[in-house]
């Protein structure tokens, strides 16, 4: 069931929700939380589709906030709110309200969203793209117990991690961190199978993928060992190699679907480690609404410390640099000696 409301208010939207529930025969509210999606028109469809799929596990009232761009000064001076209320089959197992904000109301989205929040229910705000630098201090983020961003969609994803660490507030999380949950579980399970001491590690993945940096920082923080970050053609994370006192432990996933776990002294094992879609990631984040202390610790470890420790795990680079320096020294010295040897006989001949 869909209801379109043009130039409306939050009060009229609430009335449309009540009338819609009565019309489909479910007057009671069975939602467990409010999910606020802040996005643009381009990414609204994909984000809403993922939220609807996640609502099968977490029935929720989904509020999609779309801030429309006004092209003329006259349009920017006018405030208008359009809404689309979806219930029943059109909203999966929850309720969906698509809010399109025009003009001055774009800067006051929280005043539109606040009356539509479910009473006595947790609030989660998700920015699929264009997340604020400090989600907790954003007017919409301040309404939520949990704030979800995705640094993978940022223009400079690696630099975005540093900004997230500086502005971290309990309740913040990132889908780039959620993507590595199966990797962290598999690596922890592998270390439980052998009695050993990890001496170093290497994480390999495609360039500009913040999940690779987050996994490397998590390993460095938890194991207290140097970790090197290497680049590959992808897709996503491709492998993790841990050097231990009992031999190497390697988790390799070259195709983005099936991984191979190799432990010294044991046969190789194939494990399912497929890349998950956004709906699965959001569903995982909605399972827990308390602060993720492990994410905070890994995020605050710091990319700079990871780079310093990476240098200690790559002695071959240092050796090559030293050899190249020695070669350059020899090359620079040799030409200076040769001309001197040639000039002496030339002077004798002249005499």
Image (tube, helix red, strand yellow):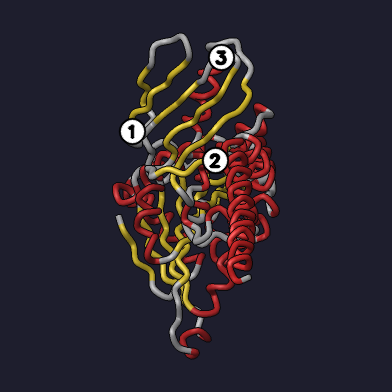
Q: Is residue 145 visible?
A: no
Q: Which mark is residue 204?
A: none
Mark 1 vs mark 3, CA separation in Å? 24 Å
Nearest the viewer among 261 and 228 is 228
The N terminus sits in image quarter = bottom left
**Residue 309 in the image: x percent, y percent?**
66, 38
Q: Is residue 247 above or below residue 347?
A: above
Quick one: SS at disc 3?
A: helix
**Residue 130 in the image: x percent, y percent?**
51, 62
Does label 1 or label 2 sit earlier along the sequence? 2
**Residues packed near mark 1 inside 10 Å, few (<14), some (14 to 19) or many (20 plus):** few
Are dots 1 and 2 in contact, CB under 8 Å? Answer: no
Does label 2 or label 3 sit earlier along the sequence? 3
**Residue 35 in the image: x percent, y percent?**
50, 50
Q: Residue at x 65, y 36 (%)?
A: 312
Q: Which mark is residue 229?
A: 2
**Residues packed near mark 2 inside 10 Å, few (<14), some (14 to 19) or many (20 plus):** many
Q: Residue at x 62, y 21 (%)?
A: 198
Quick one: SS at disc 2?
A: strand
- Mark 3 sits on what residue? 192
Mark 1 vs mark 2, CA separation in Å? 21 Å
Q: Quadrant of residue 314?
A: top right
Nearest the viewer among 48 and 230 is 230
**Residue 215 in the image: x percent, y percent?**
55, 37
Residue 253 lies left or right of residue 345; in this view the side is: left
* Residue found farthest to the bottom: 74
Residue 318 lies left or right of residue 67; in this view the side is: right
Quick one: SS at disc 1?
A: loop
- Mark 1 sits on what residue? 257
Q: Residue at x 40, y 53 (%)?
A: 47
């Amino acid at each position: 069931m869909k209801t379109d409301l043009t130039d409306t208010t939050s009060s009229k939207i609430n009335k449309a929700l009540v009338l819609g529930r009565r019309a489909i025969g479910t007057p009671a509210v069975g939602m467990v939380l409010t999910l606020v999606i802040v996005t643009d028109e381009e990414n609204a469809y994909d984000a809403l589709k993922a939220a609807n799929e996640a609502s099968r596990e977490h029935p929720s009232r989904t509020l999609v906030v779309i801030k429309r761009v006004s092209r003329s000064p006259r349009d920017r001076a006018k405030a208008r709110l359009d809404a689309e209320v979806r219930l029943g089959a059109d909203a999966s197992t929850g309720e969906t309200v698509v809010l399109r904000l025009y003009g001055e109301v774009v800067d006051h989205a929280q005043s539109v969203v606040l009356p539509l929040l479910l009473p006595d229910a947790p609030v989660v705000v998700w920015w699929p793209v264009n997340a604020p630098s400090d989600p907790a201090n954003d007017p919409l983020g301040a309404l939520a117990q949990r704030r979800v961003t995705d640094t993978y969609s940022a223009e400079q994803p690696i630099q975005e991690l540093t900004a997230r660490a500086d502005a971290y507030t309990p309740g913040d999380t990132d889908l780039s961190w959620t993507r590595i949950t199966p990797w962290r579980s598999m690596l922890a399970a592998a270390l439980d199978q052998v009695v050993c001491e990890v001496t170093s590690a290497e994480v390999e993945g495609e360039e500009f993928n913040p999940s690779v940096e987050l996994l490397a920082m998590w390993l460095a923080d938890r194991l207290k060992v140097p970790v090197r970050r290497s680049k590959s053609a992808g897709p996503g994370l491709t492998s993790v190699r841990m050097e231990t006192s009992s031999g190497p432990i390697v988790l390799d996933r070259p195709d983005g679907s099936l991984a191979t776990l190799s432990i010294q002294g044991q046969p190789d094992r194939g494990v399912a480690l497929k890349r998950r879609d956004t709906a699965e990631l959001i569903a995982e984040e909605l399972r827990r609404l308390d602060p993720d202390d492990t994410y905070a610790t890994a995020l605050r470890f710091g990319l700079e410390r990871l780079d310093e420790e990476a240098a200690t795990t790559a002695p071959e680079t240092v050796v090559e640099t030293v050899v190249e320096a020695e070669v350059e020294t020899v090359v620079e010295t040799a030409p200076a000696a040769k001309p001197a040897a040639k000039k002496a006989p030339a002077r004798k001949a002249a005499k």
